[in-house]
Image: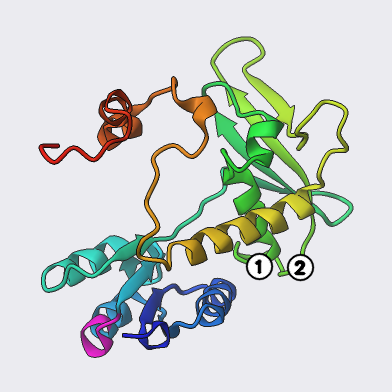
Amino acid sequence: MTLAMHLVMVVEDDKAMQEVLRILFEGSGFRVVVSETARQGENNARLHRPDIVVVDLALPDGDGISVIKSIRVWSPMPIIVLSARADRIEHRRDGSYAVLDYKTGQPPTGKQVRMGLSPQLTLEAAILREGGFEGILAGSSVSELVYVRISGNNPPGEQKLLELKIKPGDTAQSPDAAADNARAQLEALIRKFENEDEPYRSLNLPMWTNRYGVYDDLSRIKEWSAAGGLEIPEW
């Protein structure tokens, strides 16, 4: 089967996001069918038998979970859940927008965000610039990316304006440029995994090998690290 024969079904009611995903997938050689409701998604999955499904969780007649459950009754086809909800978006007097994210712990640094380790805010800004949030026109500008630390201490809400720098003396990347770069990196990552031989690496940067979390436990990173990354049959 050639790449051009692969069919992607997008279950998404937002017109702007439909267009973004259509451009992304068709630009990579896929055919695309769009469903705007959960019911359409369930029916079109059986009718078109897509190779992969991209589903939003918030749909006008239900949620994406019902679509997933319906498909899973009869098919193991790959399903990607694509959904975003910003903690807070503020419309500034100059017409630009600020995207805020609430954190109970230590927020990531500008360097971590710039390197793509914590792309949540920049991807939310990219969605905003494409008109993906209701009531905000495509092409709008993002002037600030802000973390608000909610710790219960005094002060109760500490705001941290994100400065996107690799080194302290660097010129900070603008939020709009960071949003465009985050989208480009996401598109590149998706195209990278079009190659069936491309592995799904748990850790891409060795600087984080000593920092483990629940997802790292599921990936069995400590086991593979102890074995030196060798493919041991009994594992």
Q: Is residue 29 magenta?
A: no
Residue 198 can be seen, yes or no: yes
Residue 91 can be seen, yes or no: no
Q: Kindly identify the amino acid type of the residue bearing the numbered disc 2.
A: Gly
Return the x and y of residue 129 as percentages of the image width and height: 70, 62
Rendered residue at 28%/29% (across/down): 217
Considering depth in this image, is 3 or 67 the residue closer to the camera? 3
Considering depth in this image, is 40 or 10 the residue closer to the camera? 10
Rendered residue at 19%/71% (across/down): 71
Rendered residue at 84%/38% (across/down): 172
Q: Point out the tag, 2 or 1, that comes first from the N-terminus.
A: 1
Q: Is residue 70 left or right of residue 122?
A: left
Name the residue furthest top.
Answer: 154
> Looking at the magenta stretch, what is its main secondary structure?
helix
Q: Decide: marks 2, 1 in contact (CB < 8 A)?
A: yes
Q: How crowded is the residue under tag 2: few (<14 C-alpha within 10 Å), some, or many (20+)?
A: few
Residue that numbered label 1 is attached to: 131
Q: Kindly identify the amino acid type of the residue bearing the numbered disc 1.
A: Gly
Return the x and y of residue 128 as percentages of the image width and height: 66, 59
Q: Is residue 142 left or right of residue 44?
A: right
**Labelled disc at residue 139:** 2
Q: Is residue 52 left or right of residue 211?
A: left
- Disc 2 is placed on an element classified as loop
Q: How crowded is the residue under tag 1: few (<14 C-alpha within 10 Å), some, or many (20+)?
A: many
- Residue 168, by quadrant, is top right
Q: From what the image shows, is residue 181 above or below residue 71? A: above
- Residue 9, by quadrant, is bottom left
How far is the residue under mark 2 from the one under mark 1? Answer: 7 Å
Q: Which region of the structure is painted magenta? A: 45-50
